[in-house]
Image: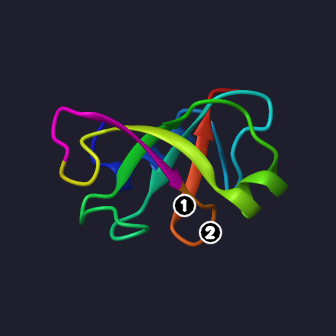
């Protein structure tokens, strides 16, 4: 719960895995810190739809489903984001 920028701390404090790379074995949540790759001042979270290798994610980015992304309030959209500064992936162990 909370703004996107708050999700990493909340996930870590509740025993979820946090990583600079997506879950290679299944879905994960991507967390963008404020103003990272187009995120607002509140940050952003989206769902990485399937597991991807770190090499693929770094080369091609990850396909993410989003709600309320890029001005589309109440709209589900798909976007490609890239691992890097201000990006964290979280998933349940």
**In the structure shown, which secondary structural element does the residue marked by tag 2 occupy?**
loop
Please give the name of the residue rendered at 63% of the width and 61% of the height, measured from the top-left corner. Answer: 83
The vertical placement of 67 against 36, above or below, is above
Question: Which of the 4 quarters of the picture holds residue 72?
Answer: top left
The answer to which of 5 and 46 lies nearer the viewer is: 46
Question: Which of the 4 quarters of the picture holds residue 78?
Answer: top left
The vertical placement of 92 against 48, above or below, is above
Side of 1 relative to 93 (left or right): left
How many marks on residues? Answer: 2
Residue 12 among magenta residues: no
Side of 64 relative to 39 (left or right): right
Q: Give the labeled residue for mark 2.
A: 84
The vertical placement of 20 against 13, above or below, is below
Side of 27 relative to 52 (left or right): left
Please give the name of the residue rendered at 33% of the width and 58% of the height, measured from the top-left corner. Answer: 43
The answer to which of 54 and 13 lies nearer the viewer is: 54
Q: Are marks 2 and 1 in contact (CB under 8 Å)?
A: yes
Q: Give the labeled residue for mark 1.
A: 87
**Colour approach in the figure:** rainbow
**Residue 35 pos. (x, y %):** 34, 71
**Residue 18 pos. (x, y %):** 64, 47
**Which range of residues does the magenta coloring cover?**
72-80
**Residue 46 pos. (x, y %):** 44, 40
Residue 77 among magenta residues: yes
**In the structure shown, which secondary structural element does the residue marked by tag 1 occupy?**
strand
The quarter of the rendered structure image containing the N terminus is top left
Label 2 to label 1: alpha-carbon separation: 6 Å
**Residue 82 pos. (x, y %):** 60, 61
């Amino acid at each position: 719960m909370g703004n996107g920028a708050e999700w990493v701390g909340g996930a870590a404090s509740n025993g979820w895995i946090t990583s600079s790379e997506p879950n290679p074995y299944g879905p994960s949540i991507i967390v963008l810190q404020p103003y990272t790759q187009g995120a607002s001042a509140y940050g952003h979270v989206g769902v990485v739809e399937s597991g991807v290798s770190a090499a693929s994610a770094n080369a091609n980015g990850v396909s993410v489903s989003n709600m309320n992304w890029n001005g589309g309030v109440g709209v589900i959209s798909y976007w490609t984001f890239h691992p890097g500064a201000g990006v964290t992936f979280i998933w349940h162990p």
